Structure formats: structure tokens, C-alpha cells
Image (spheres, rainbow, N blue to C red):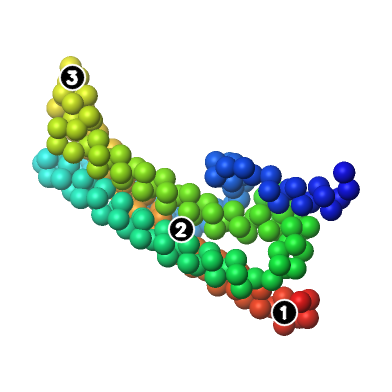
Amino acid sequence: MNSANYEAKELTKEKKLWDIYWASRRLPHSKFNIITTLLVFIALILNSWLSQQPVDETLAFVRSLADSGLSISLSTLGFLLSGFTIFATISQPTLFLRMSEIQNPESGLSYLKHNFFIFLRVFIYYIAFATLCLLVAVLGHSGGLISLLASYSPHPVEVKFALVKISYIVICTSYYFLLMQLKSFVFNIYHAVMTSLRWVAEGYE
């Protein structure tokens, strides 16, 4: 197998979205995003622990968060698809092929897959969040499967309390985390477009 064929096959190595996610785990995360998300997570734990709000009110709030999170995440996915389409169409094929030949030292992937996976990882995060919200909305409603299973527990009140608090923390933290991912996505779109224009301006196309 010659080098050109090998590089061409590498472009289609990933067969499923899961393969892309697994490979994207090697990509570095923004330290700002990680640190601030961790701080928000800690603040939500403290807020949940110290809050005097009745558990039924917190449960209603969590359900409303799940409902709005599902619609927001699906709407945002449309925006992300538009941004990704701009990036994919405005960039030059020769630029993409050149990027596929150079390895990124941080991730060990080619610069092409490194940049594409950064975008696709955000898609995956939003799909995962939409799935979480859908499960909470479908299974966590009054009389739903989660409520039914909690009622069979020897300590249904404590189980309900724990599930509501954990759901509150996880969903609210996810909201903030995805907001930070959206911030990074916007910058990455800008950087990708400027890179493509610079490629043309310097006479490579």
C-alpha cells in the first residue's frame, strides 16, 4: 500500500460517531472552561445543600429545566450545523489535504481531524445533553418510571430527595458547560475561516 492510499484511508478511518468521540478525547480542553465549570459545579453543590426550598419545588424546577434544555439543545444544534457548514464549505480542499498530512503534537491526530473533531465533539456534547433532558422529561414526570422505582425503595423520601438534588446539580452544570463549549465553538469558527482566507492570501490556492 503506497503512502497516498494510506493517507486517503485514514480520512475515513472512523465509522461511527462513537469512534469520533473516542478519538476526540485526546483533544485538549480549555483550562478556563474546565476550571469555571468545576467552580460552578461546587457552587451548585453548596446551593443544593444549603437550600431550604421544598423538594417538590426543586423537582418542578428540574423538570422545567429538562423541558427547556431539550428544546434549547436541539435549536442550538441547528445553529452549530450552520456554523460547521460554513467552515466546511469556505475552506479549500487543498488546505484540508495539506492539514491531513501534518500531525498535531498535542493530540497526535492530523491537523485536519484535530480541527474537525473539535467541532464534532461539541455536537456530541449537545446530543448527549438533549438525550439526558429527554430521559428526564420522559421517565421523570409525575408517575413516571423513576418515581415508580423510587416508591419501591425502603426509603422513598430519601431516594427522591437524592435524585432531585443530583439531577439539579448535573443539569445546571451541563447548562454552563455547554455554554462554554458554545463560546469556544464560535471562536473556532472564526479561526477556521481566517485560516482558510490566509491560505488563499499567501498564494497556496
**Helix, strand or loop at mark 3:** loop
* Sequence-first disc among 2 and 1: 2
Q: Residue 39 location in percent, x, y?
A: 38, 51
Left or right: where 37 falls relative to 117: left
Disc 1 versus disc 3: distance between alpha carbons? 66 Å
Residue 98 against residue 143 in the figure, above or below:
below
* Disc marking residue 181: 2
* Disc marking residue 152: 3
**Helix, strand or loop at mark 1:** helix
The residue lying at 18 percent from left, 19 percent from top is: 152
* Sequence-first disc among 3 and 2: 3
Left or right: where 68 falls relative to 31: left
Q: Which residue is mark 1?
A: 200
- The residue at the far top in this view is 154
Which mark is nearer the camera, 1 or 3?
1
Residue 143 visible at all = yes
Q: Residue 205 location in percent, x, y?
A: 76, 77
- The residue at the far right in this view is 2
Left or right: where 86 falls relative to 155: right
Task: Bin the neighbour count of mark 2 within 10 Å (Cα to Cα): few under 14, some 14-19, many 20 and up.
Answer: many
Disc 2 versus disc 1: distance between alpha carbons? 29 Å
Camera-side residue of 48 and 163: 163
Looking at the rendered structure, the kind of residue marked 2 is Gln
Residue 168 against residue 192 in the figure, above or below:
above
**Helix, strand or loop at mark 2:** helix
Residue 79 against residue 50 in the figure, above or below:
below
Which quadrant of the structure image shows residue 142?
A: top left
